[in-house]
Image: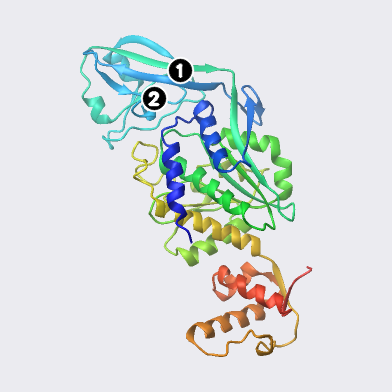
Amino acid sequence: MKNIGNDIYALAQRLFPLHRSITGNGTRKTLHILQEEVPHLTLHEVPSGTRAFDWTVPQEWNIKDAYILAPTGEKIVDFQESNLHVVGYSTPINKTIPLEELQKHLYSLPDQPNAIPYITSYYKKRWGFCLTDNQRQGLKPGEYRVVIDSELKDGSLTYGEIILPGSVEKEVFLSTYVCHPSMANNELSGPTVTIFLAKWLLSQKRKYTYRIIFIPETIGSIVYLSRNIQEMQKNIIAGFNITCVGDDKAYSFLPSRSGNTLADRVARHVLKHAHPEFHAYTYLERGSDERQYCSPGVDLPVASIMRSKYGVYPEYHTSLDNLDFISPAGLQGAYEVLQKSIECIEADEVLQTTVLCEPQLGKRGLYPTISTKKSNAMVRDMMNLIAYADGTRSLLEIAEKIQVPMWELIPLAQKLKTENVLRVSSQ
């Protein structure tokens, strides 16, 4: 396979400096760049004040600059150096205050003294700065100038959507978020891997329709559901929330609330065979948009395949979750796992043998003329596939039963269908 990880990583590098939030121009710019990659991406604006179930779209927030000047006149905390230095959604301020008052508006991590924390205050108006604890401990008494050049006003929330029609209306759903500032694994790995999955899907003959969205986390999924829930509940057969898919550590799996949807079963199957060392979590350890997609009354079949799970790795929600934490190999690995999962969903169908007793494979050219270890395994898998193709089991269920990766059975099933040994069951 082409080393697509380098391309995904290059896109992450391009997007990294942009200041994203749940609304605003940085998020729009991010979506416009993704739109350059896949022009099928359409952008939607939802006005501030719009109700979405129990929530309301907040005012739009944009920021131009922010900094702290020390008593010496030195600029010690600078938004231009790291956009994590400002508490998300900070109200504007321009005043001089003593260190004692400033400390009430500072955030740092004593147990990670070299990391800048990521802090937000979306739904309560406040202002603040984030800095390393080493910086904070070095502050001297005196008067500090604090400047945040930001604006909160009625505007809109922006999200992106790609609909790729298939031969049937039933859908596979992919969701990722674009709302965090400069963080690599917990932000950019998701949309960059997802946009390249969309590129790949555009090149494929698709059985299912694909609904792919790029949203601000939480409020975005709630808004999107409020606009599309009936169609989604009617059509979606499987979905994945795509986040934290960029580092080189072990894979993680977080199930849907029911734990046994097609997405759950496919994800477990792919990880079990491709990366058996993966970490399995429970729905009790949820923390991203699966909270909305799997909530009571919504009940969509959405699971998550990740590398290092959000909230688990020490770099999470800090400046240490940077471009050095992810890698082309890590991104490509996650891309391939999700690609395999989609291929399994596309190929899953209930199969029925067309002959009584074992079929004569030789006369159909399906039996190898030379016996090798590899050819013997292929014949064994083919005969086991036929043995369980009784019109009640899907290909995924058969793969689980005979303990063979489904992607190895897909070409065998296709050959057997071509030779009329198997057919798709009408049940």
Q: Which residue is mark 1?
A: 150
Q: Which numbered disc, 1 or 2, marks the residue that appears first in the sequence? A: 2
* Image mark count: 2
Asked whether 352 or 342 is in front, the reply is: 342
Q: Callout 2, which amino acid? A: Val
Q: Residue visible at 59% across and 57% down? A: 342
Q: Residue visible at 66% across and 80% down? A: 386
Q: Which residue is mark 2?
A: 86
Q: Are marks 1 and 2 in contact (CB under 8 Å)?
A: yes
Q: Is residue 267 left or right of residue 328?
A: right
Residue 262 x/y as whole percent:
63, 58
Q: Quadrant of the C terminus?
A: bottom right
Asked whether 71 or 303 is in front, the reply is: 71
The answer to which image quadrant residue 70 occupies is top left
Q: Is residue 423 left or right of residue 180?
A: right
Residue 149 x/y as whole percent:
42, 16
User: In the rendered image of this protein, does residue 148 appear above or below residue 220?
Assistant: above
Badge 1 local density, few (<14 within 10 Å), some, or many (20+)? Answer: some
Q: Callout 1, which amino acid? A: Ser
Q: Is residue 392 left or right of residue 82?
A: right
Q: Is residue 151 left or right of residue 82?
A: right
